[in-house]
Amino acid sequence: MVSLADVRAWNPGALDEVCSGVQAKVPVLTNEGDDYGKLLPVEGWSGPAAEGAAAQHKSHMQGLDTYVAGAAAIGKAVGQAADAILAVQAAIKNADELARKYGFAITADGAIVCVYGGDPPPELHPQDRARAQQQLADDVAQILRTAEDIDSDLAAVLDKAAAGQFGTGDESTVAAAAADGLKAPGMTFPEPPPNATPAQNAAWWATLPASARDALVRDRPSVIGAMDGLPAVDRDKANRVVLDRDYADLRRQRDDLQHRMDGLKMSDPQQQNEHHDLQVRLDALNDKISSLDAVHDTLAKGNRQLLFLDSTHPRVEAAIAVGDVDKAANVAVFTPGFTTTVNGDLAQYDTNMDDMKRMADRIDFRHGGGPTAAVTWIGYQAPQWSEIANPDQSVLGPHAAQAGGESLAKFYNGIGAGHEASNTPLHLTALGHSYGSSTTGYALGHDTPVQDAMLFGSPGQGAEHLKVPQGHLFAAQDAGDTLVPNYGNTGVLGPSPYFSPDASNYHQMSTDASVTEAGPLNATEGHSGYLDAQSTSMYNMAAITTGHPDLAQYKGTVLAEGPR
């Protein structure tokens, strides 16, 4: 078994030297071997001596073929192993830095131990620290898993080469034998653990060299693009491949359906029924194609990352960020609600998030806090008018919000795990509107790295208890928003952020016109105005997202911060 101490001591530089030496010898062997291969047969030489020489020559060539094929395979595998070790040792370095950040140390045998004799400093929140400890445990487990794989793979290549098992020994030239050796698989890499958490996904990805990551993005874009915990830049690359592939596939399906419909006789009642059924399918395909058009057009604005794309559901799901999620110190994730679709709403919501990011950047310029990225997350099947009688999808029930909340919690945790894996500071804010606030609340019923949450136009907060630090829940209700219930008790979508006893946990935000250092800000009204540009409501979101709630405008008394 490979130990963490072993991996720390591995010297990839030595392997690079071996790789260079072997790779330099292979062309020499190839050239000399092919010259030797041309010595026989000699024209005009026959008889027993010629036959004996030919047999000996053939035996030498077969041995030389397998030797050169093995040398080529070794050169390739040793070079791959050196790159793989560098990636694993970089993952160890990142894990060491994460451990120091949260007051832990990683022992020689891979245990995670607390460095404090007493209680940790108060700024290290217990829940954040527990999450970091789990991330470290996942990191170490994956580092050892990958290291063991590197060690066994390289040993297998060396053993196979020693046994002369590379190449066939019957290649037409030594050059062909060397090419066969290079075609050998060489190093492989372990899969992530089954049913991996976002933290485990992040740990797995961190141990892979760039060449392996690139190959996975190229060969398995659907899998990589959907994996919470991977860097946004890699998910974006993979999902753009998926976007192009799905677009072509949906257009092909649409053309096939249209061709079938064009061949039907509308005078035949049976074919009329078939035409109707095909038309329903065609309309659904056109909606999906329209959704992918919306995704494409949004990405074309620039400075966007496609963090999620799924065309397999009745309606396309997608998540697009404005800004660089990996490098942003502040990330806001906005979840919309009832009637939301990608083709109908992504463009406008992306514009809203762009407006919010610009305001956040202005706050950062004046007060600090770091760069911001803002995500529009339409990663669930938001209820539609046509589904109001469907108990599993109705806006009048919690089921769609609960299902969406499960996915949203993983998305939050994926962003957190990605930042932890790269030791990039993160202030994560959840924004939820209308039924999307209920979805957000159900997500926040799970353990996530969300530090602030703002629910606006909310029919109910979702889960009974939101796992957000005390004093970091915010709510906004516009004048004239008649879709916000005014009852005081818990409804089917959870307690009201405004009127129930649970409302005392929320800062009630102003949406009136105001004048701040950002200049005059407009009031917002009704159920759909909260994201209006240059509004008090939008300014409040930007202030909270950047970690400056003191700059926001409130309706009532600001609650003191306290323990979770």
Image (tube, grey):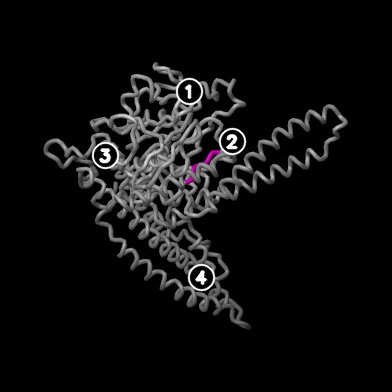
Q: Nearer the viewer, mark 2 or mark 3?
A: 2
Task: Give the amino acid at mark 2.
Answer: Arg
Q: Are marks 3 and 4 in contact (CB under 8 Å)?
A: no
Between 318 and 330, the one lying in front of the other is 330
Label 4 CA crowd tier, 10 Å (few <14, some 14–19, many 20+): many
Q: Residue at x 53, y 75 (%)?
A: 37
Task: Give the amino acid at mark 4.
Answer: Met
Image quarter of residue 72: bottom left
Above or below 423: residue 395: above
Task: Give the amino acid at mark 3.
Answer: Gln
Q: Are marks 2 and 3 in contact (CB under 8 Å)?
A: no
Q: Are marks 3 and 1 in contact (CB under 8 Å)?
A: no
Label 2 CA crowd tier, 10 Å (few <14, some 14–19, many 20+): some
Instruction: Identify the magenta region.
Output: 312-320
Q: Position of residue 527 (x, y in %)?
A: 49, 31
Which residue has dot 4 on it?
61
Between 383 and 240, the one lying in front of the other is 383
Task: Give the CA distance from mark 1 to mark 4.
Answer: 73 Å
* The magenta stretch spans residue 49: no
Task: Give the CA distance from mark 1 to mark 2.
Answer: 19 Å
Label 1 CA crowd tier, 10 Å (few <14, some 14–19, many 20+): many
Q: Secondary structure at mark 4?
A: helix
Sequence-first disc among 3 and 4: 4
Q: Secondary structure at mark 3?
A: helix
Task: Give the CA distance from mark 3 to mark 1.
Answer: 33 Å
Q: Nearer the viewer, mark 4 or mark 2?
A: 2
Q: Which mark is residue 133?
A: 3
Label 3 CA crowd tier, 10 Å (few <14, some 14–19, many 20+): many
Which residue has dot 1 on it?
398
Q: Which mark is residue 315?
A: 2
